Image (cartoon, rainbow, N blue to C red):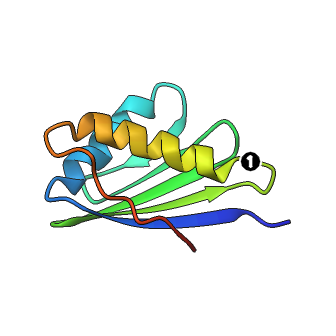
Amino acid sequence: MSDTVSVARVPTGSASRYLQHLAKHWSHKMAVTFDAEQGSITFPSGARLEMRADPDMLDCVLTVPADGDAARMRTVVEEHLNRFAFREAPLTFDWREG
């Protein structure tokens, strides 16, 4: 079995702000690197979220180990980003297998 890779392009004019907010939020308990344009979060389960912010889009690539719950991890990412995007939530996540 191989890792599950899910890719989403999330339309928003606030991609950089949401990327940074999510990275800061999780930085106290996970391995996180980020700047205004990109970020990476490694979860204790071994799952990894990579994000890239463009002026009108937040690209998310979520890699979940074969023994993990990819659907649950997608939901966790969506719920957290929607919490930070409360002014325009719900954001549109078009998750596709990568």
Q: What residue sits right under mark 1 in the picture?
A: 68
Q: Is disc 1 placed on a helix, strand or loop? A: loop
Q: Is residue 90 above or below residue 3?
A: above
- Residue 3: percent from the left, percent from the top? 73, 63
Q: Position of residue 56 (x, y in %)?
A: 17, 67
**Residue 52: quarter of image:** bottom left
Residue at 41% x, 66% y: name it.
94
Image-based side of 87 in relation to 34, left or right? left
Quarter holding the C terminus is: bottom right
47 vs 66, left or right, is: left
Reply above or below: 48 against 6. Answer: above
Is 46 positioned to the left or the right of 15 in the image? right
Please tell me how crowded label 1 is: few (under 14), some (14-19), or many (20+) other residues with Cα within 10 Å.
some
Question: Can you see residue 14?
Answer: yes
Can you see residue 32? no
- Frontmost residue, 71 versus 65: 71
Spot the residue most to the bottom: 98
Residue 70, given in percent of the width and then of the height, sits at 64, 52
Instruction: Tell me the residue at 28%/52% (across/down).
Output: 91
Residue found at x 79% / y 67%: 2
Compare residues 33 and 62 and report the one nearer the observer: 62
Where does residue 15 sit, x and y in percent of width and height?
A: 23, 55
Q: Looking at the rendering, which quadrant does residue 97 occupy?
A: bottom right
Under mark 1, the amino acid is: Gly
Side of 81 where 15 appears, left or right = left
Q: Residue at x 26, y 36 (%)?
A: 84
| Residue situated furthest top in the rendering | 28
